[in-house]
Structure formats: structure tokens, C-alpha cells
């Protein structure tokens, strides 16, 4: 069977930006055309508009990437969206997480999965973890320290190998 996916930004003010140097003749031929361009790993199609920029243009995101504190997840991590939103910028993905729950006093049937409260193991609630290799950028040390504190606060997750990270300071 065939399945096609479509994505869009939450706000019409959001989008991708590319900086290109065009000859005047190329710019003049493209500036009023309706253009569609594939972007990203899945080659999703986006409308493209071409606009001139002033010569004082400054790159909006990483004018100097070394000016940011960088936290790299070396394992999947349990974090709230509120904590993640403290990052100045992030390159992150999520993964599903679920585990088996048992009650050692009442579990007698270990070979099948049942509903909560039965005599068999059951699945926990599904959670979304931030995937290992996700990168979070911070412009202030205090905010980055709060992010690290949230990672380390999840002691049980750290004990089983989750919420591990590397921090690279300015």
C-alpha cells in the first residue's frame, strides 16, 4: 500500500531560510515565480519565495556557534517540554518509551501480558523521551545548569542508563 505524509509549520510565520548569492539576471527570472522545493530528509515540498536581503544581513541562529553552551544527550532522556523550552535552540528528536510493570506479591502468571491489576505483567504508560544525540544550545550558564539539574533529578532513569549527557561550555 502507498502512504503519503504531509507536514506543515504550526505558524505561518515559521519557515526555513536559505542564503544564496544570485546573479541579477537569475534573481530577476525567479523573483515573481511560484516555486516549490523539496527540503529535509523526507524531501517534503515547501513553497519558496525569493527576497533580496540588505548587505548588513546577520545570520540569525548561529552567527558564532562557539558563543553557546552545548548539551549533547549521550542516551535517551526523560525531560519535560518546559525544561526543553529553556534552550535557546535545539536539534532534537523523540522516541517512545514503555516498560513492563509487575507486582511481586500478586504476579503469578509471567508468560502473558494482561491489563493492570491482573496476575500478569502489564505495560506502563507510554512516554516520549528525547533521543540520544539530541543537542541543546544555551546562551546563559544559569539556564544550562537548570537543564542539567532536570536531567540529574531523574535518579531512577540515570541508574538504568538514561538521562546521560555531555556539556560543552563556551
Image (spheres, helix red, strand yellow):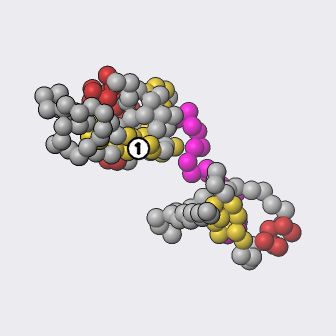
Quadrant placement of the N terminus: bottom right
Camera sees residue 143: no
**With 37 as the anchor, is 142 left or right in this view?**
left
Q: Residue 129: horizontal and vertical position, in percent?
A: 39, 41
Q: Nearer the viewer, residue 121 or 64?
A: 121
**With 136 as the anchor, is 151 left or right in this view?**
left
84 versus 104 height, above or below: below
Span shown in magenta: 49-68
At 26% across and 40% down in the image, what residue appears? 122
Which residue has dot 1 on it?
A: 96
129 versus 71 height, above or below: below
At 48% across and 34% down in the image, what residue appears? 132
Task: Say how many tags the image has.
Answer: 1
Q: Nearer the viewer, residue 42 or 116?
A: 116
**With 51 as the anchor, is 137 left or right in this view?**
left
Q: Residue 79: horizontal and vertical position, in percent?
A: 34, 40
* Quadrant of residue 96 within the rendered picture: top left
At 34% across and 24% down in the image, what residue appears? 160
* Quadrant of residue 29 within the rendered picture: bottom right
Q: Nearer the viewer, residue 128 or 149?
A: 128
Identify the main secondary structure in magenta.
loop
Q: Residue 20: horizontal and vertical position, in percent?
A: 74, 56
Camera sees residue 4: yes
At 57% across and 37% down in the image, what residue appears? 65
* Quadrant of residue 31 within the rendered picture: bottom right
Q: Residue 147: horizontal and vertical position, in percent?
A: 35, 35
Give SS at disc 1. strand
Amino acid at each position: 500500500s502507498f502512504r503519503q505524509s504531509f507536514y506543515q509549520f504550526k505558524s505561518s510565520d515559521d519557515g526555513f531560510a536559505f542564503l544564496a548569492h544570485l546573479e541579477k539576471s537569475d534573481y530577476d527570472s525567479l523573483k515573481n515565480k511560484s516555486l516549490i522545493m523539496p527540503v529535509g530528509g523526507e524531501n517534503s515540498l515547501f513553497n519558496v519565495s525569493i527576497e533580496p536581503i540588505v548587505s548588513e544581513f546577520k545570520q540569525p541562529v548561529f552567527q558564532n556557534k562557539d558563543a553557546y553552551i552545548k548539551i549533547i544527550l549521550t542516551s535517551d532522556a526523560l525531560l519535560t517540554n518546559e525544561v526543553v523550552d529553556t534552550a535557546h535552540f535545539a536539534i532534537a528528536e523523540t522516541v517512545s518509551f514503555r516498560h513492563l510493570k509487575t507486582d511481586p506479591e500478586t504476579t503469578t502468571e509471567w508468560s502473558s501480558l494482561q491489563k493492570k491489576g491482573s496476575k500478569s505483567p502489564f505495560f506502563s504508560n507510554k512516554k516520549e523521551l528525547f533521543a540520544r544525540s539530541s543537542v541543546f544550545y544555551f546562551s546563559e550558564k544559569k539556564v544550562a545548569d537548570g537543564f542539567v539539574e532536570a536531567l540529574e533529578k531523574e535518579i531512577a532513569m540515570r541508574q538504568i542508563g538514561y538521562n546521560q549527557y555531555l556539556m560543552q561550555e563556551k
